[in-house]
Amino acid sequence: MLSDKVWKIKKPSPSASTLALETGLSPLQTQLLINRGMSDKEAVQSFLHLRLADMADPMLMKGMSDALPLILKTAENIKRITIFGDYDADGLTATALLYNLFSDLDIPVSYYIPDRLEEGYGLNNKAIEKINGDGTGLIITVDCGISNEREIAFAQSLGMDVIVTDHHQMPDNPNLDCPVINPHQPGCPFPFKDLAGVGVAFFFAVAVRAGLREKGWFRSRTEPDLKEYLDLVALGTVADRVPLTGQNRILVNSGLETLAGTRWVGMKAMMEVADIGESEVSAEDLAFRLAPRLNAPGRIGESSLGIHALTTREAISAKNLALRINSANSKRQDIERDIYDSIEDMIEKAGGIGERRTLLLGAEGWHKGVLGIVASRLVDKYYRPSLIYNVRDGLAVGSGRSIDGFNLFRVLNQLKHFFEKFGGHSHAAGFTIKVDNLGDFERELDALAREMLTDDVLIPSIDVDAELSLRDITRETIHQIRSLSPFGAGNPEPNFVARSLDVLESRIVGERHVKFKVRQAGEGNPLEAIGFGLGDKHPLEGRTIDMVFTPELNRWQGYENIQLRVIDLSY
Ligand SMILES: [Mn+2]
């Protein structure tokens, strides 16, 4: 069974061995580093030696020196600060970070997380009125605010100050009459632009503490240790899929260490329900176990659960909240599966996707909180830009996901005459369209896709770092590979290809996965391999295969085994 994906194997670099001599690393490591864009000793060293001391100076962020006096003013007038956040994992961790910090600092503080389904993203006037009613003197936005010019003016008209902290691209003509902290704003000298919302909030926190220290705030109070907040930063940063390079790499790496002994009881409880051991937490644990859970309650209309969990100081309520978050996640999965299954039915009844270059599908009663995830799953399966919508009162409201070579935002912008509303970026977008327009929109969308997506673009590919023999895989090489972690966006987990492998035993596990033993043809010790979601390649026993994989050490009942996690295989 041949693979339906193209394996794009990077060419071995002639300078890998020189760089290895210069740095004392192995040629395998330097090859991986070169694949990730590092070509000299200095770049390699700053990538590998992650020190908090190399964190950039928060005062380099434009707007910071204007923001700090507002904090002092609010604190001295004994007014309340309200953190206005967002319902996704980045927004929730950013909100919790500043809320927990101001609580530690003894400054009255509240938070406001808008309801994902009722209010949507960003500030709104109703929320601002509510916030104004509780004695708030200062609103600090996190992970949002940059496009809320009118709402901010409204808050100011009620007598409140506002500080915007955000990491989204700036709108065309920003005209905000308040301190703005966002590394993307023109003229901001901060050296690193790819922070998540929680990363911006963290640099803000560092500056706030320094500002208060200067004013003598800690003469009678304990100074908070900001390292204790780095696990929140790691979680939000990984969840938001910003590149794990530069400052993010430093923050996430330290945050993963903090997480092992986390101070936040809700974090600890969520790790327990997500089956994450405390000994060695990886960025993948955050991306695939914690972040989806933290995002789930907002999707199904329980936006408050996540923020409660991240801010509570009571172990019992933390435990309770973590369990409720876990069931929200299961519920989200059920809803998602139902919609996905009905889509598969629709596609099957239509006789497959045929010549279609895009998928546009919807129905009444599809829960709008999960449409984006469903669209992602369809992209994974069919490798076509997929737009999924719910129909209500003659309007279709939906979410789309795309593939390389088809900038969804630009395409929707080209077809904007069809929409009541739309927004997003190259790979993900949201839209609202009258049901009456759907037919014409679908025709034009597919016609555009026919022009843009040639047959070769429609074949998914896998980037492979190098070709290896299974004989070269030892505990030592695995440690060398892992030393480049944390892996994620911007620093993908290394993948390798090995060829002519004998499969010795194989079986299906858990319905969709395959487990087998494999060795380099005719020689060497067999190694364990597991392929998640590769059950349809079964049976493998007795075959000679090529495969793409990443090697890892699997800890189980006190033993540590080499395991090859199979990404794709072909025979
Ligand atoms: Mn964000």
Image: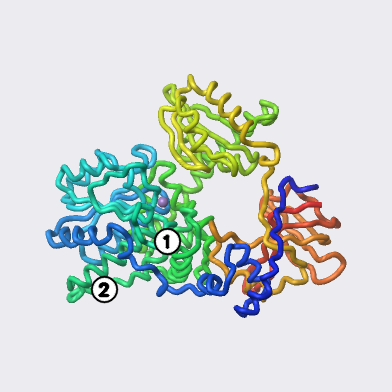
What's the distance in space between the residues labelled 1 and 2, CA to CA?
A: 27 Å
Pointer 1 local density, CA inside 10 Å: few below 14, some 14–19, many at least 20? some
| Residue 308 visible somewhere in the drawing | no
* Residue at the disc numbered 1: 192
Q: Is residue 78 left or right of residue 145?
A: left
Mark 1 or mark 2: whose residue is earlier in sequence: 1
Q: Nearer the viewer, residue 555 or 166?
A: 166
Q: Nearer the viewer, residue 341 or 26?
A: 26
Q: Is residue 44 left or right of residue 93?
A: right
Spot occupied by residue 217 in the image (x, y as percentages of width and height) = 19, 71
Image quadrant where residue 525 sits: bottom right
Spot occupied by residue 463 in the image (x, y as percentages of width and height) = 66, 55
Secondary structure beneath disc 1? loop
Which residue is rendered at x = 50% and y = 75% of the image?
Answer: 49
Spot occupied by residue 332 in the image (x, y as percentages of width and height) = 49, 44
Type of amino acid under label 1: Phe
* Residue at the disc numbered 2: 223
**Mark 1 or mark 2, whichever is nearer to me:** 1
Type of amino acid under label 2: Glu
Spot occupied by residue 326 in the image (x, y as percentages of width and height) = 47, 52
Q: Is residue 305 left or right of residue 347?
A: left
| Residue 458 visible somewhere in the drawing | yes
- Is 93 situated above or below 352? below
- Is 343 situated above or below 314? above
Secondary structure beneath disc 2? loop
Q: Nearer the viewer, residue 275 or 478?
A: 478
Which residue is rendered at x = 56% and y = 29% of the image?
Answer: 445
Pointer 2 local density, CA inside 10 Å: few below 14, some 14–19, many at least 20? some
Mark sitting on residue 90: none
Which residue is rendered at x = 16% and y = 43% of the image?
Answer: 158
